[in-house]
Image (cartoon, helix red, strand yellow):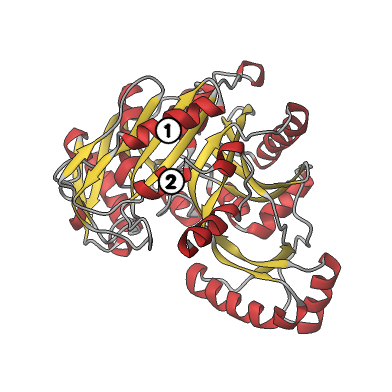
Amino acid sequence: MPETLEQSAGRFDTVLIANRGEIAVRIQRACRELGLKTVAICSEADRQAPYGKTADSFLCIGPSSAAKSYLNQDAILLAARLAGAGAIHPGYGFLSENAAFADAVEKAGLVFIGPTASSIAIMGDKISAKRAMMAAGVPCVPGPDTALPDDPATIERIALEIGYPVIIKAAGGGGGRGMRVVPKADVLHEAIALTREEARKAFGSRSLYMEKFLEHPRHIEIQVICDDHGNAVWLGHRDCSMQRRHQKVVEEAPARGIAPDIIQPVGLACVQACLQIGYRGVGTFEFLYEDGAFYFIEMNTRLQVEHPVTEMTSGVDIVQAQIRAAQGHVLDLIQGDVTCEGHSFECRINAEDPETFLPSAGVVTHLALPAGPGIRVDTHIHAGYKVSPYYDSLIAKLIVHAPTRAEAMARMREALAGTEVEGISTNIPFLRALFEDGAFAQGETDIHYLEQWLKLRRAT
């Protein structure tokens, strides 16, 4: 006889963290605070990772290549069995939004700390996600909720109906990959061909869709948490418009200048969408916001890199809430309990050249991190740590919180001034310069602003 949700609550006491770096440290801390044991895994390149020493078990699962270690599903499942883990937390990136992996975890008798495989599949495909959001009343970017056909004449007609400029996107894409802006009709078919091939190589599918390209939008996110008992809440909103090549650099919460009566219906629609598809755990709805209107672009069915700014403003430990939802617990807050106070910024500190943004590997010879009221640093590095060339360049997240946006910006300037990393190149000088920019300070930015700012800097 299958167990009920009440019986399954708390059904695991050991979590395997199927990730690395700062997010492995963050998840490990949340598990310890919940009284759970942890299993850390690593590749050959990460054998000296500091979080391995604080885990209850530490297993090397493969070579330095991510494909043979952090993306090796069989190796991860074997490690979980060997270490006696009852659940797997995928973090972000790697296998975190892989529906087949979520399904394999559940079939192995383990708990996947995230949504069900079916929810990941629905929301992971941008076309089915758009269809689900439209059904729930979530506003979407103008464009059909079907894949583009192969017929050139039909594609031309769809583009004309939407109106140029349009943007072509891979249905299975994400992370800024598999998309191309088409400003006019005479480059449409070339853009289609190039994006189809990119999509095939990156995501294993040539399926594309087309939407209106908004010229001056902001990137706004809404964080949700859901349980398996039909309860869901949204925890305010974030602005992630400061992007370079579609990759976020600085995030803040709340998004500046959006009235509660505008954002609240959108947040409630996101909650309704989650309830309709039986969503469990945490997730993020991403929108473009222009001229007072929201347009859904995608949902991330995982923990976000930028979750700390929402934690700082809402007071909710999102990682713990995610784990408790996977245990089958009832959500311990209702929408009326959610209050967001003050303002928070997050800077992604990357091991990269601050001018060229090329990755920088090597040994950290000196590290000084800021501390004090309203300052948080999420990192896995230390003096003597060897930054590997095999993985993403993110080495730390610097987060601040203060009563107002202006005070939070001032606090971030001071925190950046007190952050020192030597032995490798980092983007800290770039971040310091950005927080001195007047337009950013006034909130007069959109998703294209940072690229334009960088071009002006290079020209002067």
Asked if residue 265 shows in the view, the reply is yes
Secondary structure of the residue carrying numbered label 2: helix
On screen, residue 427 above or below 220: below
Question: Residue 447 in the image: x percent, y percent?
Answer: 61, 52
Q: Position of residue 219 (x, y in %)?
A: 62, 47
Q: Is residue 175 above or below residue 444?
A: below
Q: Disc 2 residue type?
A: Ala
Q: Is residue 91 shown to the viewer in this render?
A: no
On the picture, is 255 further left or further right than 250? Answer: right
* Residues packed near mark 2 inside 10 Å, few (<14), some (14 to 19) or many (20 plus): few
Nearest to the observer: residue 22 or residue 384: 384
Of all residues, the one furthest to the front in this rendering is 460
Q: Is residue 336 left or right of residue 420?
A: right
Residue visible at 31% across and 51% down? 426
Say which residue appears at 62% left-offset and 81% top-offset: 193
Residue occupied by mark 2: 433
* Earlier sequence position, callout 2 versus callout 1: 1
Residue 412 disc label: 1
CB within 8 Å, label 2 to label 1: no
Q: In the picture, residue 12 is in which quadrant?
A: top left
Task: Choose mark 2 or mark 1, whichever is in front.
Answer: 2
Query: How many numbered marks, from 0 up?
Result: 2
Q: Which residue is located at x 72 percent, y 61 percent?
A: 213
